[in-house]
Amino acid sequence: MEYGCPRCSSPVDERFYGPCETCRGQLRAKYLSEGREVVVAEYEPKMNVTPNAVALKDD
């Protein structure tokens, strides 16, 4: 499929519509970032309900 690059308007012959290879490389370099690890507190269920008698029954 031949079309004009939406970023630089140069003629492009690609399978899918989007920026040309040069523009894609520039965008990858511009928005390159490192991944980071997010620490989240461990889930603790709310205790606003009373347990049923079967769950509390001792053997």
Image: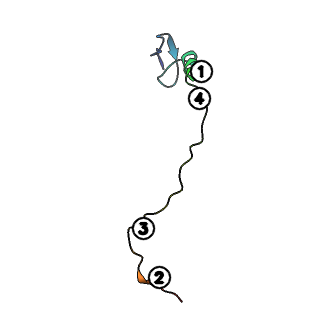
- Please tell me which of labels 2 and 3 falls first in the chain: 3
**Image quadrant in which the C terminus is located:** bottom right
When asked about the image quadrant of residue 29, the answer is top right
> Which residue is drawn at the image coordinates 52% and 24% (left, top)?
15
Residue marked by disc 4:
33
Amino acid carrying mark 2 in the image: Leu
- Please tell me which of labels 2 and 1 falls first in the chain: 1
Nearer the observer, disc 2 or disc 4? Answer: 2
Residue marked by disc 2:
56
> Which residue is drawn at the image coordinates 56% and 20% (left, top)?
30
Nearer the observer, disc 1 or disc 4? Answer: 4
Amino acid carrying mark 4 in the image: Ser
From the viewer's side, name the closer residue of 45 and 12.
45
Classify residue 2 as left or right of residue 50: right
Where is residue 47 shown, x and y percent of the image?
A: 42, 67
Q: CA distance from mark 1 to mark 3?
A: 49 Å
Where is residue 57 shown, x and y percent of the image?
A: 48, 86
Residue marked by disc 1:
29
